[in-house]
Amino acid sequence: MTAPLIDPFQRAISYLRVSVTDRCDFRCVYCMAENMTFLPKKELLTLEELDRLCSTFVTMGVEKLRITGGEPLVRRDIMKFFQSMSRHLDSGALKELTLTTNGSQLERFAGDLYAAGVRRVNVSLDTLDEQKFADVTRWGRLPQVLRGIDAAQAAGLRVKLNAVALKGFNEPELFDIVEWCASRDMDLTWIEVMPMGDLGNEDRLDQYWSLKDLRRQLAERYTLTDLTERTGGPARYVRIEETGQKIGFITPLTHNFCESCNRVRLTCTGELFMCLGQEDRADLRAPLRMSDNDVLLENAIREAIKLKPKGHDFDYSRQTVAGQMTRHMSHTGG
């Protein structure tokens, strides 16, 4: 392994999130516009190029690889990529290969994912109400997602639910969602809605539900114990003593989690974003295609990591959406 990646604030970069496509079979209101213009396919990195890029990061110390989208499982032949990445699990260089999905394709791919070495998946699901699900995803099919979760658990995958906290939308379902996850032995992470992308018809201030308030509501019904564990991501966890389940909180707005940030994000076009909440980026596609020699690519990655900022600028104070990013979440990779 070459020298590890250390950013200007002495944080080791050990976690890479990779968007393998900007396409999705849903149109979630906080992630995409209803009529999205997707990237021309010729601009996307090939699966072989994604393999080379990810493999280079692994040689530079990345131990956790999370595949995202869009919806990663709608990318054609994506299982070939997972199967190829499994060699890094076999060698011990990669500690975890996982993905975030909307669950729509899990019924098809759960067994193949397990065979490729995936042991955990995060499923994005904000409501258990079929009509609300159709509303928030625009195109969504809740029964298909629920069958996907069934298939994932049957295949041996550990499923964690990611739910975006949306004021006035899933507030009434807080306890229903918690108890449904507990009944299925699934952990749950709540995420504050982030100011990503101008979607035209969405008021992010009206959507914003502080997780401080969500946690307060949980504490009124359950006994919560703070946990010190981290999974390599930004969530902070509690255990609900009555159910034994783990609840995570990702709070970019009420708590800036940047001090321990160990991750960068790679888009499906080869752009590396050093921070979800900043516009700084580096083009890795050019050095990737310029030479078969990985030295040029490694140098480009190191130069990019030197630009990693201390933190993001998300802020909803003073009733303005300060720090709003112009790109959609689907572009950066969840």
Image (spheres, rainbow, N blue to C red):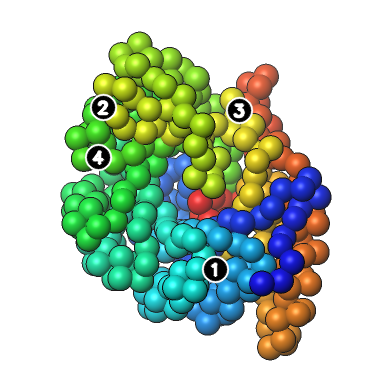
Q: Marks 1/2: CA distance?
A: 35 Å
As drawn, 185 above or below 118: above
As drawn, 298 above or below 175: below
Q: Earlier in the sequence, mark 3 or mark 4?
A: 4
Q: Earlier in the sequence, mark 1 or mark 2?
A: 1
Q: Marks 4/1: CA distance?
A: 30 Å
Determine crowd level at label 4: few under 14, some 14-19, many 20+ residues with C-alpha closer than 10 A: some
Task: Pick the residue in front: 122 or 280.
Answer: 122
Q: Which residue is mark 3?
A: 255
Q: Earlier in the sequence, mark 2 or mark 4?
A: 4
- For the residue marked with disc 3, what is the amino acid? His
- For the residue marked with disc 2, what is the amino acid? Thr
Which x, y percent locates residue 192?
Answer: 50, 32
The answer to whether residue 132 of the structure is visible from this angle is: no
Residue extending furthest toward the bottom: 292
Determine crowd level at label 3: few under 14, some 14-19, many 20+ residues with C-alpha closer than 10 A: few
- For the residue marked with disc 1, what is the amino acid? Ala
The residue shown at (77%, 48%) is 10
* SS at circle 2: loop
Q: Earlier in the sequence, mark 4 or mark 1?
A: 1
Q: Is residue 303 left or right of residue 148?
A: right
Front disc: 3 or 4: 4
Q: Marks 2/4: CA distance?
A: 9 Å
Q: Which residue is mark 2?
A: 243
Q: Earlier in the sequence, mark 3 or mark 1?
A: 1
* SS at circle 3: loop
The answer to whether residue 231 of the structure is visible from this angle is: yes
Q: Marks 3/2: CA distance?
A: 26 Å
Report the disc number at residue 93: 1
Q: Which residue is mark 4?
A: 185
| Screen quadrant of the N terminus | bottom right
